[in-house]
Amino acid sequence: MPIPAVILVGADKGGVGKTTVSRTLLDYFAARKITARAFDTECPKGTLKRFHPGITEVVDVTSVPDQMKIFDTVESSGTQVTLIDIKAGLMTPTLEALRDIGFIDMTKRGDLAFAVFHILGPSIASLDEIAETSKFLLDARYFLVKNFINNTTFFDWDEGTYNSYFNKIPHAVEIVVPKLSEMACEKVEVSAVPFATFIADKTASGQPAGYSFVLRGYVRHWLNGVFAEYDRVRLTEILDSQDAKPRPSAKVAELSPQRASS
Amino acid sequence: MNAFAVDRFDAPASPSPEPGRSAAAPIYVVCSPNRQVGKTMVARLLAEHYAADARPFAAFDLSDEAPGLADFLTHHVTIPSIRDIRGQMRFFDGLIESGNVTKVIDLSHREFANFFTIVDKIGLFEEARRRAIEPLILFLIDSSPIAAKAYGLLRRRFVGTSLLPVRNLTVAKGLPYGASFPHASRLMASLEIATLGPAARAVVEREKFSFLHLNKQGWPYSDMSPRTRAEIEAWFRRARFQFREIELSLIREQILTALHSDLRALTVR
């Protein structure tokens, strides 16, 4: 029996690709037929909402009414996954709020699944964030995401230092988001559609878009790589209750260009 | 989430053409990981085969060394660059856009790995087949281990794409196809390029030479003996005959595919 899951995507630094990772997660769940809703905390403008307007709501995660809107409806919303794209700087305050309202205790009881995608930046400050964040997450699935989409080089990191942080959190799992061609990335941004929709050569309204086949190919190849990472860490298993049998790993080959026009 | 994004992942991964797509002109990729095996010659023969029938074709010189296709078919050849993404967009998007024009690509041994890596990443061959464009890899075989290895890689990586070994008898005479170059295509066709005598060979390798203008008087045809001329004509005819066999085989496959599709539709009803 699936249990509802809350996924937090965040980092205390800006510009590390939180929204990009959120977008890939929404595409991933859609591809696996897992219903999802999303909250965009870039209040009031919203960033994630541009790409997934039908399922995204812009909220102020620091306000109690909006916290109620998100967390009081996790089970009643009818969707399996509630994804929250946390604005830069709000990761730790949000986790504190979740602890204070008893949400983290609920996840300990197994009533809800809880996972955090911590997007790492290239600087050493990111490693301090890991220590800061992980103390809230002893019973949550904790994913440390190295995002190379914009060819980030993790120049500040000494591998030994990183490992010493990483090893302190036995339940942390590393995910690598590969690089995507800048032009392809930019084109999807401008098109303001989900990655899967771009690959399918559709506009937001479902009309044929006429995007470059080459760019669509690169995005498809890249998204396959990201999905392979999510499959590797058995992401869908967070939705399974503890007595459930493991789900079969989803095949990334399901995302192929032939389906674009089907 | 937009509904079509979900739908997209549900559809079967069939490389068959979309319903209603009529068969389009093929894309020939003439290639080898080695130099001096006759790639440009095969590409020239193919391009001139289409030119001789006044059928539309576009030739692309990815040979990056002289003499390349562009040195012979000066008015019909584009020299693309696939080193950056803009060049790739111009070239690969163009390849699948105009389906009624046959494309001939003369692929350099230096661009071999890069070309097929990109093709694999962007799913060019699958997309081409979806648009009823048949991609055909014409692989010039030779005795080097690198050729056998590259052939095996292509065969594994592009399952379902026609990979035809081409035996240029000048470099691959007596070389067994055997386990190294097994026929990997639904097409019942193969290609063998006969050896030309030294005099004829010297003429056809002259810059701007065209098989279609053998009867012209000026350079590069002026000092050709009638015997050499006849040899070249026969050689070109023989190559064209084999190209026609490939085309016939393509048409046969297209008709069979259409028949299967009709049969499936009838069974469903």
Image (tube, grey):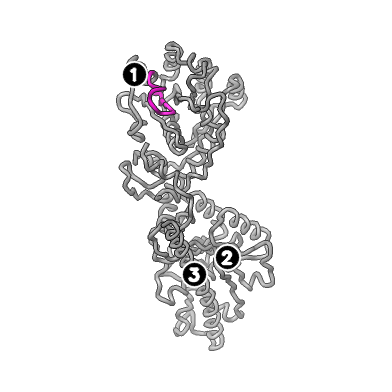
Q: Which mark is residue A66?
A: 1
* Residue B243 in sight: yes
Q: Nearer the viewer, mark 3 or mark 1?
A: 3
How far from the left and from the top, in percent, is residue A83? 42, 27
How far from the left and from the top, in percent, is residue B164? 57, 65
Range of residues picked out in magenta: A72-87
Q: Which mark is residue B252?
A: 3
**In the rendered image of this protein, does residue A177 appear above or below residue B56?**
above
Looking at the magenta stretch, what is its main secondary structure?
A: loop
Q: What amino acid is at disc 3?
A: Arg
In the picture of the structure, the residue carrying the numbered disc 2 is B164
> Which residue: 52% across, 42% down?
A252
User: From this viewpoint, which residue is outermost toward the top?
Assistant: A100
Most foreground residue, B261 or B98: B261
How far from the left and from the top, in percent, is residue A32? 47, 37
Tell me the crowding category of disc 1: few under 14, some 14 to 19, or many 20 or more residues within 10 angstroms, Cα based. some
> Which residue: 45% across, 16% down?
A95
Q: What amino acid is at disc 1?
A: Asp
Q: Is residue A85 magenta?
A: yes
Q: What amino acid is at disc 2?
A: Leu
Q: Chain of mark 1?
A: A
Q: CA distance from mark 2 to mark 1?
A: 63 Å
Most foreground residue, A77 or A219: A77
> Which residue: 50% across, 23% down?
A126
**In the rendered image of this protein, does residue A22 appear above or below residue A218?**
above
Image-quadrant location for residue B228: bottom right
Element class at badge 1: helix
